Image (cartoon, rainbow, N blue to C red):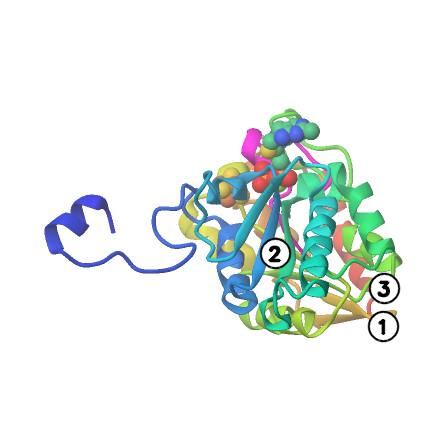
Amino acid sequence: MSEQDVARTGKKRRQSPLGAGTPMCAGCGGLQALHQIYDLVGDKTVFVNAAGCMTLLSIYPFTPFPGSWLYTAMACAPAGAQGVRDALDVLLSKGRIRPEQDQLPVVLTGDGSAYGMGLSATSAAIDRGLDFLYICYDNEGYGNTGHQYSAATPTGARTATSRVDGYSGVKKDLFTIWSAHRPAYVATAIGTEPADLARKVKVALSLRGPRLLLVLAPCPTGWGFEPARMVEIGKLAVRTGIWPLKEYSDGIVRHTMVPSKRVAVEDYLHLQGRFRHLFVPVRNDDKLAALQLQVDDYWSHID
Ligand SMILES: Cc1ncc(C[n+]2csc(CCOP(=O)(O)OP(=O)(O)O)c2C)c(N)n1
Ligand code: SF4
Ligand SMILES: [Mg+2]
């Protein structure tokens, strides 16, 4: 509801911590997922955010979250979460806050921090067994600065820094990197599969120690599609098998949604401007087959 609508109708604006008025793109898959996660995580949280699109959710001294918000440099959000945890522990030990007033440090970063700049600080925090939740919304590029490639960019995607044939690297496997540290919990998720996401948030909240929710964030602005197609694209990411939904705990990896008949990868690619060069002016059959093979190869190792 716009300012004019509020003045004209006298109706109140819908009250949601992440509601209307957030300065984010329409159809943002990251924001959609964060809405759902926040509904379950609640306000006894201290968000520790590294620079990225979601930083726009907090403009000093205001934040839409009833809890607290701490902004850090890209490389050090998990170190910030350690400071928050330590401070809360001191307050608890001195009786300055009661146990029921304790809060959960929640790191919130994009893939640029999670897969790259902040990975060292993350690894160290997991090694220390820090009791925190890490939410990474993965829009597969440095979105906030114009969508340059990151270590999460998929092969072949055009970005601001990989223009002609698209990104020549391979998307880093952050799920496995986290799991190799043997933390309490690691899960991939997406906002367009809300039941799967909600269950994983609840599992994460029931545990202590380092926990990661790695959420694919379809990004109309960086990926080049109409905001209205965000849900369709998110669902195709799962149905093609490009974004496997899975979780890790106690040394075991489980797939939580296995597509019964996988849709062709190109059905997902051709909806996005970042892959348009694979279809026009000339269809690149070799590259499309190679991208399909990457996905087939992954699933050939899953029972
Ligand atoms: C060390 C450092 N380098 C560069 C920047 C500029 N910068 C701000 S946000 C951003 C993009 C972050 O990408 P990502 O973590 O994927 O989040 P997104 O913007 O996609 O939400 C960059 C490069 C910075 N803040 N700090
Ligand atoms: S650039 Fe992408 S991730 Fe960032 S706010 Fe816009 S849609 Fe969301
Ligand atoms: Mg990003």
Between 241 and 184, which is closer to the camera in this rendering?
184
SS state under label 2:
helix
- The CA distance from mark 3 to mark 1 is 20 Å
Kindly report which numbered mark, 1 or 2, lies closer to the viewer in this rendering: 1
Image x and y of residue 268, in percent: 58, 51
For mark 2, what is the residue? 237
Is residue 94 located in the magenta-colored stretch of the structure? no
Residue highlighted by disc 3: 301
Task: Look at the numbered disc 1 and give the secondary structure of its residue.
Answer: loop
* Residue 262 drawn at (x, y percent): 66, 64
Q: Residues within 10 Å of mark 1 (few under 14, many from 20)?
A: few
| Badge 1 vs badge 2, beta-carbon distance below 8 Å | no
**In whole angstroms, how far apart are the C-alphas of marks 3 and 2?**
19 Å
Tell which circle, 1 or 2, labels the residue nearer the N-terminal end.
2
Q: Give neighbour class at mark 2: few <14, some 14-19, many 20+ (Cα, 10 Å).
A: many
- The part of the chain drawn in magenta is 134-152
Residue that numbered label 1 is attached to: 250
Q: Amino acid at mark 3?
A: His
Q: Residues within 10 Å of mark 3 (few under 14, many from 20)?
A: few
Q: Residue furthest left?
A: 8
Q: Quadrant of residue 274?
A: top right
Three-letter amino acid code of the residue under disc 2:
Ala
